[in-house]
Image (spheres, rainbow, N blue to C red):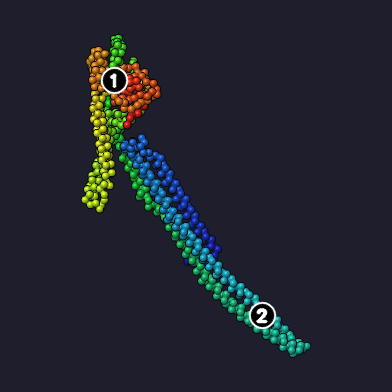
Amino acid sequence: MDWGTDLWDQYDIIDKHTQSGLELVEKYVKFVKERTEIEQNYAKQLRNLTKKYNPKRGCKEEQECRFSNHQSFLDILNEMNDYAGQRELIAENMMMNICIELTKYLQELKMERKTHLSEAKKAQQSLESTYKQLDSSKKRFEREWREADKAAQYAEKTDQDINATKADVEKAKQQANMRTHIAEECKNDYAAQLQKYNQEQSRFYFSDVPLIFNKLQDMDERRVRKLAQGYVLFSDTERHVMPIIGKCLEGVTKAGTNVNERNDSIALIEQYKSGFERPGDLDFEDYSQGINRASSDSSLGTLGTPKGPLELLGKNRSKPFWLFSKKSKPTVTEDFGHLPPEQRRKRLQQKLDDIGKELQKEADQSEALGKMKDVYEKNPQMGDPASLSPQINQTAQNMERLRGELNKYESWLTEAGRRGDSMLRRGTLREDALSYTSHSNNNGSTHEPYSPDRTHSEEGTPDPSQAIYAEFDDDFEEEEEELVAPIGQCTAMYNFPGASEGTITMQEGQVLSVVEEDKGDGWTRVRRANGNEGYIPTSYVSISLGK
């Protein structure tokens, strides 16, 4: 069954059907384009989402990536970013393989359909022209035959008329014969035109039209087949990326299974373990004894030995350590002295490892430059040995600088190890006299106040004043009598009364010289412009150390 045989008389139906098919292709292309726009917008939103929740470099969240639950969340973000890439790939393939291909094919079909319809119209016009000629010859034959019939009747009438002359009769017969001859010619012409039209009509309905309709049928079937392929590509395009999407989803699942709560707890301990011991019991202070502290304090004050932060609190010297109180942010120092002992040792060791790697890298480069210089000296045509001197000198300077930093951090690490052991034996205390309550640590074996210079009264001393003098004597022997050069400056953020021995007063906004850094007990040794020295709470000032 074909259109040329079974639909030979349904030209209008075929015309509408083929046009409707082309419109369906256009509609499907538009549908796929909108689908690709949805995929692209979806992928864009996914990428923006992952970018929004990805931690910025150097932020607090990036530092927490050592925990498995944080790292797994980053893995999920990375997998979702890859998933967004697959959605973009789906949109791109649909646009290339379906939209562009079908649009190009659609233009070809439109041109082909136009050509076939034009051929059909030409054949129709040719048949109509032949029919017009046939109709014209038929009418002429009809007209001439009537005229010939009239002429024959007139000649017969004239021949029977007794009054007609012989010349009139001959003339009438000649006229009748002429009309009859013309009528015969018209008859023959009409017969020829009729035969011609029948032949063309037969060719039109049995050859030309079936051929054109069959071409339109073939075109339409090819359109349907191409459209069906587009339907299949619509699903295959997404099916082809399904394995990768599946891997992305497997990665999300794996990120969830990689979370280890126990390892996270251990990592938190390793990161923030201070190394301090828990605070010991508070002493009972018997004010009924009437100990005369004023005389000892005043006499000690002339020597300028600091006593410690507990003396600042007066009646509140037995104030406990509040674990959940708000703590002021410490000033970051190069030697990591602002960190607890355990964390300071780890950071120093990490810094030493980094410097060691850099030093090894510079050493390898120096060795390579030395070998290259030897090659240039033995083979001058390969290069000038003097051209390597700047690089060799720069590498030597870098190595010297790194060795200096290595020695500096090694000394700090050694100091941190000794100080950490000392703090574990005797504890440390840190107080903030404003609304900020900070650390207070004791070793549990003694409860006497600690002073900023890391000395304490000996255990079991009956007279507190004698313990204070002994404490001062020990420190005095260790300190140099000459003034120490300042290592930086600090600006007071709050007023400080300096009521305890060893401390000095300061006003908010006052600038002081830093003589000795905070060594973990919350006190910093400073000097006024007039030369007076003393200790102040580290949390009360903003410190800027000199390079």
Say which of marks 1 and 2 sits in front: 1
Tell me the number on the disc at residue 451.
1
Tell me the number on the disc at residue 145.
2
In the image, taking residue 103 as reference, residue 428 lies left or right, namely left
Q: Look at the numbered disc 2 and give the secondary structure of its residue.
A: helix
One can see residue 254 in this view: yes
The picture places residue 76, in percent across and down from the top left corner, at 36, 42
Residue at coordinates 59% horizontally, 71% vertically from top-left? 128
Residue at coordinates 21% horizontally, 50% vertically from top-left? 378
Q: Amino acid at mark 2?
A: Trp
Which quadrant of the view contains residue 365?
Answer: top left
In the image, taking residue 184 as reference, residue 318 lies left or right, namely left
Q: Earlier in the sequence, mark 1 or mark 2?
A: 2
229 versus 450 height, above or below: below
The picture places residue 524, in percent across and down from the top left corner, at 32, 24
One can see residue 318 in this view: no
Distance from label 1 to label 2 (Cα)? 149 Å
Q: Amino acid at mark 1?
A: Ser
Tag 1: Cα neighbours inside 10 Å, few (<14), some, or many (≥20)?
many
Tell me the number on the disc at residue 140.
none
492 versus 72 height, above or below: above
